[in-house]
Every structure is written in structure tokens, then in C-alpha cells.
Amino acid sequence: MSPTEPPCASGYANRLLADLGAPLCVSLRVEPHPALRWAQCGAMALTGYPQQTPQMCPVPLASYADGILAALNALRPHSPVRHLDGAQLLGERAALAGYRRGGDIAPGGSCRLLPLEDGWLAVNLARTSDWQMLPAWLEAGVIADWAQLGAALRSRRVEDCLERGRLMGLALAPLRRRTPAQVPWCRELYRSSAPRRERGTASPLVVDLSALWAGPLCAHLLQMMGAQVIKVESSARPDGMRQAAAGFYDLLNAGKSSVALDFDQPRARAQLRQLLLRADIVIEASRPRALRQLGIGAEQILAENPTATWVGISGYGREEPGANWVAFGDDAAVAGGLSQVLWDCTGRVMFCADALADPFTGLHAALAAWGSFQQGGGRLLSLTLCDVVAHAIGCAALADPAASRARARQWSDRVGPEDVAAPQARPLRAPARPLGADTTQILAGLGGRA
């Protein structure tokens, strides 16, 4: 790499470790060029239009993923994470589901970049209920397919649609350039004032309240580092990924204990609270109001359990104005600026790989969680899908659109057709536990009954 290119895997690892206050330094013996990592891990095959050349991304995201794995290994040497391919983790869902690049249609199919009167808007209709909200959102008649939605949006303004849609709970993101100022990838929102004891290298108890991809990946990596993980789901609304891409739920959740609770019942909410008070690390990935409606607040739990670390993963943060905005991986990557970078390089609108903000944030969250645990916990940490992506772009040292184009051309010249591989997933070694399989045993350990 030339002196003008940013540090990649090891440089990114050391930057994140420094942010966490970890007195460690990563030095990788072999560090392939970021263009080759992008091509070989499957991300390039997922970027661009069908039947056209796959696209290079001038942000070294695949190398950054490698760097995070190296940082995790520095925090917990000799754990099984040392055998993982960080960049490969970005494409595992696509590999198992058979997704392909779709240009302005995300590989998963539920998110599209649509033209409006004054710009472009990423619209993610991942839930059946999203389609049902479209007439109210646009004050229009029945909108039954993407063609009708595109026609309804074409004469409207981005900001008007964005404001109203976010209030209604739709996952939307505008295509536009973000301020180049550096964005923090992790924010500490609360620190317990109670004395904290050092945890050293002990194995933490992790309570995973998250669903889909980012949070479960975070918990999966912590499990590989030696944590005991209890996955808690609503018995009425379990993790939607259970019914999604074949094997992907099992890949991320095998080996975790499964607890299912009916959160409509006061007793179940009390049992959840007791479980959280015993946790060393809590992972949640819902909007903050979801747990508050159950009478549970992160700050309250940390006040009573001052050695715990609470990792909150969200689309746009725990504070206003974004606390109640919905986001999924594809639209969050657009909000973070990745599609704008690709627009600068190609002059065309397109998604960057498959829901990239999800696995990328999951990797960062695992690093933040274990780093806090080793330092004694007592912290509420907030990671947002949008800001993690924006942080990565900021680290890429792309001064302007011309710099993005120049690097994309240079990096593309380093890659031949034989280097562009399809995404790959690790072998499935075991199924995840059935919903609620461990509820009785876990609750008995709390002194309660299922």
C-alpha cells in the first residue's frame, strides 16, 4: 500500500483498542491489500448491478473486519476467534441464503433505493406491517408493490417523506454525503459510581436480548471467547431470524442457552430483571422504549449490578432525535454514507454488500463489550449501526469524491476477475437450542420457576 493510503487491519485494530483504553498493540504478520480482501471475502460480488462488473469500495471494510478480529484475539489470546476470518463474517448471511448483487435493490430484496423529486431514499420494508403503513405514510391509496411505491414517491421531497415515515416507524435513509468530521464508533452514556472490581480473564455471563444479526453476532463472538451466553426471547415474538435464511440463525446462536418469557406477565418481567442483575454483559438491540415499557432501564440495572456492562445496539442511538427511528442493516449503511461513497465512484446508486452495517456493528460491539468487561464493567455503551459505518468511512481518509474515485480505480486495477469470490459461510456445526429449551433450568437457578 502506498504511504497515502490509510492503515488497514492492524491500524484499525490499534485505533479501536486505543479508544477502549486497552494497553495493547496488534501487529499482523501478513496483511493482504484491502482491495484483495474486499474481492476475496465475497463483499465485492455482492456490490454492483446484476450482469455487470462487481464494484470496488474504496473504504477498506473487509480489512477493518480482519482488524477487529485481531483486536479481539489481543484481548482474549488463544480463544477460537483466532481461527475466524473477519472479512468472511460480512457475507455469511448472503452465502447461506443465496443472495446476489442487485444494484439499487439490496441483496436481501427488502430494501431499495428509490428516486424522489430532490434525491434518493432507501426504503426498507422488511416486515409485513411496513407495507400496511404505506397508504398512511404517503396519504395515498393501496400500494401493493414496488412499482406503485416508486410512482408514489417520485414527485415527493426527501425530507418530507423521511420525517413522516420515521415517525411512523418505517426504516428510511436518505442518500447524501455526511459531514467528514470523525464520528465515534462507541459512546459511553453512563458509568456506575459504585466501586468496580477487576474481572481479569474470567468468563462472563452474557444475557443476549437481541435479535436478527448485529446483537446475536456480538454474543456469538463473546461465546467463542469463553462467555456463557443466555439468549432471551419473547415467547410471543421470538427472534425473526429463526424462520429466515436456512442455517443462519443456527450459525449465530448454536451453543447459547434459550430462555423464552411471556413479557405480558408481571412475573416474567421480574424474572428477566433478576437475570439481568446476575449478568456480566447485557446485549440489547431494540429501541430504548421497548425495555422501558417492561419497567427495565439500563441505568437502573447498572446501579444495582455495578460490575455489569450494558451494550445497547440501535440504528441511530438511545437519545433524541434518533432514539425511536427504526433501522436495519441495509438502510443504516446508506445512512452511514456507504452508498454515497459508491455514488461518488460510479455515478450510480447502489447498495454496498449485504446489510453491511449489521455484521460490522456486531464485530465492534463484541470488542467494546469484552474491553469493558476486562476493565470492571459498570458502563452503558451505545453503538449505532449508522455511526459505526460513518466512523469506518472517516478512518478511510477520503478527502473528497475525487479521492474516492481515484482510490477505487487504483484498487480495482489490483483485482482480477479470478480474485472476485462468492461469499462463503462457515460450516454449521450444531443447531441452535429450541425456543425456551432452557427456561426451566435457568429460572430454577434464579430461585424461580418457569
Image (spheres, grey):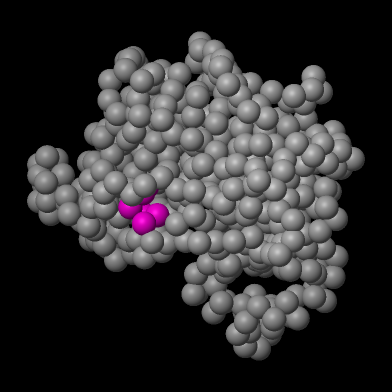
> Where 129 falls versus 186 (above or below)?
below
> Where 26 falls versus 417 (above or below)?
above
Indicate the quadrant containing the C terminus: top left, top right, bottom left or bottom right: bottom left
> Where 15 falls versus 287 (above or below)?
above
Q: Is residue 318 visible?
A: no
Magenta-colored span: 247-252
Outermost residue, top side: 23
Outermost residue, right side: 402
Residue in the image at 86% along x and 38% along y: 406
Q: Position of residue 332 (x, y in %)?
A: 62, 52
Classify residue 111 by image quadrant. Answer: bottom right
> Where 338 falls versus 96 (above or below)?
above
Tag count: 0
Q: Is residue 439 left or right of residue 100?
A: left
Q: Position of residue 188 (x, y in %)?
A: 52, 30
Outermost residue, bottom side: 141
The one of 86 and 319 positioned closer to us in this rendering:
86
Residue in the image at 62% along x and 82% along y: 145
Q: Is residue 448 left or right of residue 18?
A: left
Q: Position of residue 387 (x, y in %)?
A: 63, 41
The one of 379 and 230 positioned closer to us in this rendering:
230
Residue in the image at 49% along x and 48% along y: 424
Classify residue 107 by image quadrant. Answer: bottom right
Indicate the quadrant containing the N terminus: top left, top right, bottom left or bottom right: top right
Q: Is residue 25 left or right of residue 430?
A: right
Q: Is residue 166 left or right of residue 245?
A: right
Residue in the image at 26% along x and 35% along y: 228
Q: Position of residue 138 (x, y in %)?
A: 69, 78
Q: Is residue 238 visible?
A: yes
Q: Main secondary structure of the magenta part?
A: helix
Residue 390, magenta (yes or no):
no
